[in-house]
Amino acid sequence: MKKIPLFFALLLLFSLSGCAGRINLDQALQAGARQLSADNIDTLVAGNSLHMVSWNKADAADIDFSEKGALNAINSVGEKTHGRWTTDRDKNTLCLKFKFWGDGATNCFQVFKDKEHYLLFNNDGTLAHTFVPEYEVEYTLADLNAGVLAQPPSRARRLPRQTATPEKAAPAATPAANGGLLSTLTFGMLGADDTQANEEAEEVDQQEFAVTPMVTTKRLSQPHQQLLDSGDCPGCNLADLDLSGTKLKGANLQGADLSGANLQEANLSGANLKGANLRSARLTDALLMKADLENADLSDANLHWSDLSRANLKNANLERAYLVKAFFYKADLTGANMKGVQSQRTIFEKAVGVPEELLKDNTNQAE
């Protein structure tokens, strides 16, 4: 069976509308679409990432749904935000609330499935968005050559590939005055200038260095304890340690061995990581804004969703690193080894030292 590239999969999402433009809920039902219950919605989105496209294909965003109700999103022009999601079990709707998009309002949508695709409808029955869960996308060799990793990056927990099927009939749509996520949100394009948008993104976490409590059943090694106590551990051996979620803002880790370490969601903003060994480290969702990574070894590292805006990556080794949806706004990559990196929808806006082919590939993907 021939696999469907992501681009064509997204086109198929609009097959219901044909040339008639925006479809409504009645048309979707006539075409065989079925509504998902709240339980089905939870199974579909929790712990996964959705590539969401507005009904008219004018806007697109990648949205990560944590299992604890958090949202992290980035749109097609690189604007980021965070928020919360929940399901309304009485109305069988998916509700989204973003910090910087849509004026902070909560918008709820009925979720329908037509064959292998998903649709979000406003309460007034109009189509708001379509989406594809990333774990359901089938990639071709052409996609892989464009920078899509053959297998998804490792996650703390990843739901098995499955198809959500309605368990019970959901109530029919009730007309209501709701402009939907598109009319109020448009995935973050609210007219703010680039400087303001990026300043807001950097101000999300401005707290000083602090230690995140870690539960452990065994005595920590001396370097590990030193790092947590003071944030000062140059040249330390921290290989393969679990430092996920640790707040290490401004920490001194120059020349440290962090190979294979789990740094998922760690805050390393402004940290000194000069010459550090981060080979095969897990840095998904990590904050590395203004971090000094000059001459650091990031080969085979997982930087999915990481924020490296204004980071110093001069002469860093990024060979075979996974950079899908990473954020390199104004980063300095002069002299960096980027051979064999995996990149898709990676943001290199105003970054320097980025190979021309990577800039071209990711610009095309954003479009």
Image (cartoon, rainbow, N blue to C red):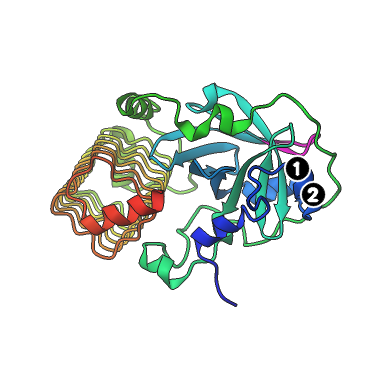
Q: Is residue 94 left or right of residue 5?
A: right
Question: Residue at coordinates 41% horizontally, 46% vertically from top-left?
Answer: 305
Q: Residues within 10 Å of mark 2 (few under 14, many from 20)?
A: some
Part of the protein shown in magenta: 87-94
Q: Is residue 126 left or right of residue 195?
A: right
Mark 1 touching mark 2, by CB under 8 A? yes
Instruction: Classify 359 as above or below 272.
Output: below
Q: Which amino acid is tagged 2?
A: Leu
Residue 25 marker: 1
Q: Position of residue 355 (x, y in %)?
A: 21, 56
Residue placed under numbered mark 2 in the picture: 29
Q: CA distance from mark 1 to mark 2?
A: 6 Å
Label 1, secondary structure: give it: helix
Is 108 inside the magenta-drawn segment?
Answer: no
Q: Is residue 59 left or right of residue 168?
A: left
Is 93 inside the magenta-drawn segment?
Answer: yes
Residue 10 in which image quadrant:
bottom right
- Along the line of sight, which residue is nearer the eye, 214 or 81? 81
- Along the line of sight, which residue is nearer the eye, 9 or 66? 9
The reply to whether residue 280 is in sight is yes
Q: Position of residue 115 (x, y in %)?
A: 71, 60
